[in-house]
């Protein structure tokens, strides 16, 4: 088959073992009989063209797993880019991605692929719409439980709505807010916005983008680390604050969920990311569990899986699991 020939030639030029090559071809050949051959051909040709740029970007990001990257390109990134190419513009693409799932890699690679179609892509993170440092100081004085940025209540929702509306209305220029986490000894603060003239696709990403409030009764028997009555009240309060975000979520056209097969992978991924510096293991664990206490993934993610337009399972080694289109 011509497609297999293209893939073989492509991989032969890159540092993949023969075993990796055979695994890839065996896995993907099973899908060919059930997929439109013209679509497969376009995917293969795009992969051939874009692979050098994608692989270079991955190396810049410190990712040196060519077989995994190639499979991600073939199974997910290029097919998803083709879907987005054909969607009406401008498009607000929401991405819900728990810590460590690879949203930075995803948005970086997708920008490269979509640029090939002459689409102007930009990124807005929940982090970018944090309240200012001074506003968060005042927030902590009112509620000492909001000691870290991240949970519901620490964002400027009106700012987020304003930016998404500007994109939807195709205003120009658009001022996209930016946040520098390194300021104020790691507390972070808002910096000068990025001015852009045109946005065809905006990736709006964050660890609870699109999450909806759930029934209060679930917190009566919540999973670890929501163990004390104080923990349960914190969880209930964050659940209530989620309601303030619904007008922001309403601006999203489509929602993608990067779904770890076990939410506890986030702690392992964060520890690996911080191995060369930053927080020590106990600080990392406290930080990650603070997020779980805020909006526990075991409680909030499952209800969203059938509502999202696309769900991509993430294995422990960051390889892709099942990909589900709704």
Image (cartoon, helix red, strand yellow):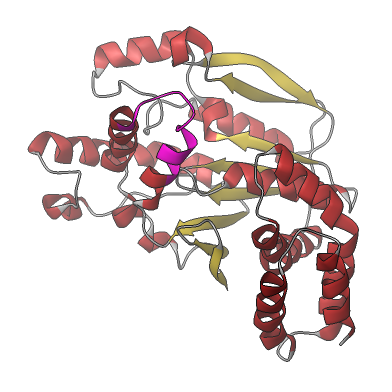
| Residue lying at 53% horizontally and 34% vertically, measured from the top left | 126
Q: Nearer the viewer, residue 287 or 152?
A: 287
Q: Is residue 284 left or right of residue 270?
A: left
Reply yes or no: does residue 276 show up in magenta: yes
Does residue 90 lie above or below 82 as drawn?
Answer: above
Q: Quarter holding the C terminus?
A: bottom right
Q: Quarter holding the N terminus?
A: bottom right
Span shown in magenta: 269-281
Does residue 131 lie above or below 268 as drawn?
Answer: above
Q: Is residue 296 visible?
A: yes
Q: Is residue 300 left or right of residue 304?
A: left
Residue 87 location (% of width, % of height): 76, 60
Q: Is residue 326 visible?
A: no
Reply yes or no: does residue 2 show up in magenta: no
| Residue lying at 90% horizontally and 68% vertically, measured from the top left | 45
Residue 233 location (% of width, % of height): 16, 37
| Residue lying at 76% horizontally and 58% vertically, measured from the top left | 15
């Amino acid at each position: 088959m011509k497609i297999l020939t293209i893939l073989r030639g492509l991989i032969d030029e890159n540092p993949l073992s023969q075993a990796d090559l055979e695994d890839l071809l065996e896995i993907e050949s099973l899908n060919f009989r059930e997929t439109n051959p013209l679509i497969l051909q376009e995917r293969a040709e795009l992969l051939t063209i874009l692979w050098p740029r994608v692989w270079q970007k991955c190396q810049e990001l410190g990712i040196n797993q060519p077989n995994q990257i190639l499979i991600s390109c073939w199974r997910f990134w290029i097919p998803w880019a083709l879907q987005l190419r054909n969607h009406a513009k401008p498009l607000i693409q929401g991405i819900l991605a728990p810590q460590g799932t690879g949203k930075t890699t995803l948005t970086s690679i997708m920008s490269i692929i979509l640029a090939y179609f002459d689409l102007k892509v930009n990124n807005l993170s929940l982090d970018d719409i944090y309240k200012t440092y001074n506003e968060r100081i005042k927030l902590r004085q009112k509620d000492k439980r909001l000691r870290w940025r991240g949970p519901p209540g620490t964002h400027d929702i009106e700012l987020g709505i304003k930016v998404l509306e500007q994109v939807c209305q195709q205003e120009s220029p658009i001022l996209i807010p930016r946040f520098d986490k390194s300021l104020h000894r790691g507390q972070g603060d808002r910096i000068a916005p990025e001015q852009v003239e045109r946005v065809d696709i905006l990736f709006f990403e964050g660890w609870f983008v699109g999450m909806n409030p759930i029934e209060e009764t679930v917190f009566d028997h919540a999973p670890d680390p929501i163990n004390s009555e104080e923990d349960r009240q914190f969880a209930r309060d964050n659940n209530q604050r989620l309601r303030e975000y619904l007008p922001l979520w309403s601006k999203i056209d489509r929602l993608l969920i990067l779904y770890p097969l076990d939410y506890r992978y986030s702690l392992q991924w964060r520890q690996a990311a911080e191995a060369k510096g930053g927080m020590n293991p106990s600080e990392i664990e406290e930080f990650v569990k603070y997020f779980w206490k805020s909006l526990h993934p075991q409680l909030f993610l499952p209800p969203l899986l059938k509502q999202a337009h696309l769900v991509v399972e993430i294995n422990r080694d960051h390889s892709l699991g099942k990909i589900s289109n709704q």
